[in-house]
Amino acid sequence: MSNLIQLNNGEAKIVSDIWTLVRLPESQVEVRKQAGKVVLFKLTGEKTVSEEQVANTVIPENGKLIVPLTVFIARKTELQTRISANEIGVWIDTHEILTSLIENQVDLNILPIIAVNVERFADGRNFSLGVLLRTRYGFKNELRAIGDVLRDQLFFLKRSGFNSYVIRADRSAAEAIASLNDFTQPYQGAVDETHPAFRRYNRVA
Amino acid sequence: MYKYDEIDQRIVDERVAQYRDQTRRYLAGELSEDEFRPLRLQNGLYIQRHAPMLRIAVPYGMLSSRQLRKLGDIANKHDRGYGHFTTRQNMQLNWPKLEDVPDILAELATVEMHAIQTSGNCIRNITTDQFAGIAPDEVVDPRAMAEIIRQWSTFHPEFALLPRKFKIAVSGTKEDRAVVQMHDIGMEFYLDTNNNLAIKVWVGGGLGRTPILGTVIREHLEWQHALTYCEAIVRVYNLHGRRDNSYKARIKILVKALGIEAFKAQVEAEWSHLKDAPNTITEAELVRVSKHFEPMPYETLPLHDANYDVAIASNLSFAAWVKRNVHAHKTPGYRAVTLSLKPHGKPPGDATALQMLTVADLADQYSFGELRVSHEQNLILADVKVSDLFAVWEKARVHGLTTPNIGLLTDIICCPGGDFCSLANAKSIPIAEAIQMQFDNLDYLHDIGDIELNISGCMNACGHHHVGHIGILGIDKDGSEWYQVSIGGSQGNNASLGTVIGPSFSADEMPSVVQKLIDVYIKERTVEEQFIDTVRRLGVTPFKTYVYPEKSSAKNEVAV
C-alpha cells in the first residue's frame, strides 16, 4: 500500500509511487551537519558529503530516479540523457543551500520532481525551502515532502508549495489526508493562496 | 477593541476541532510524546510539576469584560478558582486536565479567545504598551498594527516550526513601555518628517540564558511593509538559525554570529523579493482594523471634580492609591487605573475567579467594558472618569485590588517559579512574598519610591530579572535553591542589563539582602534620585561592599 499523497488541482489522492529514491552510501566520516556551529559551517560552505560518497552512490540503470543534490551536481554529465528523458529528479536535505542547485541548473523546470527531506518533523526549514523553490525560482513541477512527514504538518506543507507527501511508513496516509484541510480560510498569503484574507474578502469592520 | 468577523471566528473554531483530534490521537497512542509536544505547546499547554499548565492568549493585553468573566468561569470550572497573569500579557491556568483542554478551548472560542501559539517554537503573542490609545505621550496607537501582525502570524505556514520561540513587541510612544529592545523583533511606530506612519525596527533582543538588547536593523520602514519585512527577517532566521542546541537557537545568537551588518544584508536581499508582495498591508485594511480601536465615546468633562478633590484631601489611603495607581489620560476628566495584583504576601499576578468577575463588573460600570493586562502583571481600567475614581477604589478595595504599590518595590514582576514550573531551578513566588512582607509599610515604600524588582526562577528569564533595577535569579547548586542578585538593569528607552553583585544567597537571606541594597540607596541618594539613578551614578561597588562586608577581602570566593 502506497503512503504517497498527491495533490492535483486541490484534490488529494493516495497514489502509487513511480519514483525511486537514490541514497548516498553511509559515510565513515563524522556527519558534519549535526555539528555545533551550524551557522558558521554554512558560511564556510564546508561539505556535508564526501566526494567518495558521491562517487560511490549506486545509480540504478533503469527507471525514474530522485538523486541526492550532491550527486546531481557532481555527476550531471553522466545523467544527461536521462535528464532529457525526464527520468531524473533531485532531493535536498533541509540544511543544504538552494543556491548550489540553482547555480548548477538555472531552469529547474527540466526536473519533473524535487523532493525535500526532513530528518525530524520539527525542523521547519522545509517550509522556507518550498516557498523559495516555488516563488523565487519558479519551480512548477512536483514538489514532494519526504522523510519524517506527519499529518499535523501537511497543512503547512501544502501552503508552502508542496503538492506531494510521503507519509512516514508507520503512519496511515489515508488518515493523514484529512489534515490537508485543517483550515479553510487562512489569514496570510502564501504559495497556494497568494492573497491574504484582507485582499480576498471584503472584510467589514 | 478588535471584534471577530466570520473569518476570525472560523479560524479559532477550526483550531478547536484540530486540537481536539490531536488530543484524541495522543490519548489513543497514535501520537508519541515527542510528536504531541510541539502540537500541545503551540496551543499553550505545558506539562508541569503538578498538572498541565494552559497559557491563554490575550492579544496585546486587551480584554473585554465578557472575556474576563469567561476566564473567571473557566478558572472555577476547570481549575482551582484562580489564574495567573503573565509578563507577556497572557493568562495561565495551573491545574487544568489535559483531556479537558479541547473543551476549555471551545469555551474560549465563544468569547473570541484561544491559546494559539502561546508557546512552542513559533511567533508568539504580540505585546504592547498597556496604555495604548490613551497615553498622553502616545504618537501612534499601535494596536491596529499589532492586530494585523497577529493575524499574519497566526498559522503562518512558513514559520510554523522555527528554531526557537519568536517574540514581537510594538510601541507607539515617546517613552517605550513595551520593552521593544527585549524582543526578537521590536517595532517602534512613529510619524516621519512627511507625517507618514513609519516603523523603526529592532532585531535580536531577548533575555533568557544570553541576555542581549536588540539592535536597530532599519531606522525607517513604511508601515505598509511591516509584514513583508518581518517575513524577510524570520525567513533568514528559519533557514539559518541554529537547531542543534536550543540554548543557542534564538535569533539573537544568529544576529551575533553573523554580525548585524551581514544579517541586515541577508534580510534586505530577501526583502527585495518580498517587497510589494500581496502581504503588503493595504490602506483599506489599516482603516478597517483601526475602526476597532477608535477612541471611546468620551463625555466632555470639567478638568476638576469637587468631590474627588475633597476625597483626596480627606482620605489618606485614597490619596496614596491615586498617587501610585492612577495614571494620566489623553482625554480631560479621564484617568487610567491600575488594579494591583501584587497585594503583599500573595503570588504576584494571581487573580481569583471572584476578583476577575469583580474587575469585569468594574469595567462594565466605569470603563466602557474593556480592560488591559500589563506586562507588569496587573489589570488596567483604561477609561475611568475622575468623578468615578473614589467609587472604583471603594469597590476594588473590598476585593484586595487596591494595594497602592504600582511602580514601588512590592510591585514585583515574578514568574510562577519552582512551585509550578518544571523548568524552574528555584521557587520565585515565596521570595516575592517574603520581600513584600519585609517592606510591608506603605509610608516606607513610598519613601523608597520608584523601583522595579524582577524575579525569575531560572535563566529562561520569564520574570525579566535582567532588566529589573534589582534582579533576582533562582539557580540550582547541588540540588538546593540559591538566588543570584543583580542591580542596574532597566527597561524603557534607556534599557540596560543588570550587573551581578556577587555570590548567591539562600532564600532566607533574600529579604535582608534587598533591605541592605535599599539602605545603601537611602543613605546615598540625592533628593531627585530614584534607586536606578543612584546605582548608575555610584556603580555596583558601594552596594556590594555593604551586602558582603566580611567577604570583601576574600576575592577567591567562588560565585555559584
Image: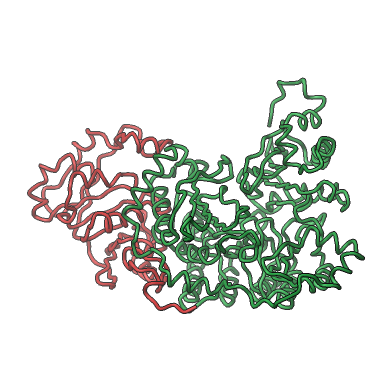
Chain colours: A red, B green
Q: In the image, residue A48 lies at what x, y percent?
A: 31, 37
B17 or B450, which is in the foreground?
B450
Residue extending farthest to the left is A81
| Residue A47 in view (yes/no) | yes
Quadrant of the snapshot with the N terminus of chain B = bottom right
Q: Nearer the viewer, residue B531 or B105?
A: B531
Looking at this view, is B213 or A37 the one in front? B213
**Vertical side of A92 occupied by B79: above or below:** below
Q: Quadrant of the C terminus of chain B?
A: top right
Image quadrant where residue A167 sits: bottom left
Residue at position x 61%, y 66% from top? Answer: B133
Q: Residue furthest front?
A: B194
Q: Is residue B309 left or right of residue B10?
A: right
Taking B78 as reference, is B38 left or right? left
Marks counted in the figure total: 0
Q: Does the image show residue B509?
A: no
- Residue displayed at 51% across by 58% down: B191
Up-down relation of residue A116 to residue B292 (above or below): above
| Residue B141 image offset from top left, x and y in percent | 57, 64
Quadrant in the picture for residue B86: bottom right
Which residue appears at 56% of the width and 43% of the height?
B213
Classify residue B322 by image quadrant: bottom right
Instruction: Please tell me which residue lies in front, B530 or A9.
Output: B530
Q: Position of residue A90 (x, y in %)?
A: 21, 50
Q: Is residue B214 left or right of residue B483?
A: left
The picture places residue A116, in percent across and down from the top left corner, at 29, 52
